Image (cartoon, rainbow, N blue to C red):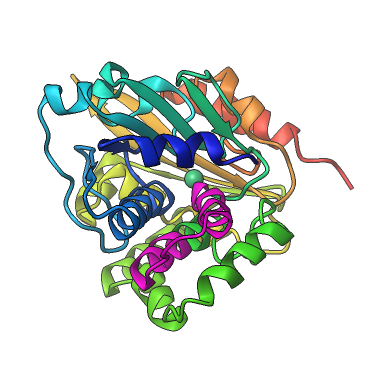
Amino acid sequence: MDFRALTEAIAEAEIITIYRHQRPDCDALGAQFGLKQWINDNYPSKKVYALGYEKPTQGRFPASDHVSDDVIRDSLAIILDTSNAERVDDTRFSMSRKTIKVDHHPPVTQYADINLVDPVAAATCEILAFCFQETSGIVSLQTAEYLYMGLLTDTLCFKTSNTTANTLKAAAYLAGFSIDIPVINRLLFDHPYSWFAFDGCLHRLAHIKEGRMAYAIVTDDILKEYHLTGSEARNHVDLFGDVIDFEIWAMFTERIEDGVSYYDGSVRSKTVTVNEVMQKFGGGGHKNAAGVKGLSESQMHDLISRLFEKIPTV
Ligand SMILES: [Mn+2]
């Protein structure tokens, strides 16, 4: 990838605003704060702001910055890890002088003036690692740690099919800055006791479809019992991922609005392409990891059947 459009725009700008997607994950946040740190280290006089309203659920990241519309109008906007404009967690980015998107999702819309998109990259942090490697400049320990967190989480510790030789090269490059690998792993992946307790509940709730697909439907009552939000509960989806027999696994959580039940789902697979089926239900995501929101109960069961049909029979 040619990074000059990005690095030249950064060199020219006096004010830079950096954006992430809604419900920010560690790749969005690691890329955002890694890029902010890198610009701070290399251009101390520039004003750099990391924007976004929604709070991170994983890792330890600084609080977002707050800026006026005027600051954004005068800024270069860099939008990270976000495939479509609607998902940017601060729509004011579009008011900026110039917009640059850096992303690894299959592009939904190329909404920025410059779009640096590599769908083969495992993480936006992987793209930024190569950008920093090619651009001579300071890479601080803090920058390296932020980017490594994004690599680790978007690949589930280098286990998913999006992990490539380049992902590991980026990780090796970042490890070269003496990041504390075991501490980062514990920070990101160790769980409190309550996690362990809910896993026990999920073992009881699991539906196994002909031994090849596992899923759980978590009702609103159970969410309340374990003091979990739907998205917190769906973070447990990979409990079913380490079983040899399961090709697809999923978790659905109930959400009641005005007395009507809706179901939000997270679906994972080893090799089966699931995002195309998910798109038919208004969802989306990656080939082996996708999500959907707001299904009725019958739509959810229809989706489960269609996902099951995608599993090749041996
Ligand atoms: Mn990502």
Magenta segment includes 134: yes
Could you tell me residue 166's position as x and y percent? 68, 58
Main SS of residues in magenta: helix
Could you tell me residue 34's position as x and y percent? 37, 56
Could you tell me residue 33's position as x and y percent? 32, 53
Magenta segment includes 36: no
Residue depicted at 43% across the width and 58% down the height = 202
The answer to whether 290 appears left or right of 49 in the picture is: right
The answer to whether 91 appears left or right of 109 in the picture is: left
Of residues 128 and 188, the one drawn nearer to the viewer in this rendering:
128
Give, as a single range, the part of the protein colored magenta.
Answer: 124-149
Of residues 303 and 156, the one drawn nearer to the viewer in this rendering:
156
Of residues 206 and 52, the one drawn nearer to the viewer in this rendering:
52
Residue depicted at 33% across the width and 30% down the height = 77
Could you tell me residue 266's position as x and y percent? 48, 41
Query: Does residue 159 show up?
Result: no
Outermost residue to the right: 314
In this view, 166 is above or below 114: below
In this view, 229 is above or below 83: below
Query: Does residue 50 show up?
Result: yes
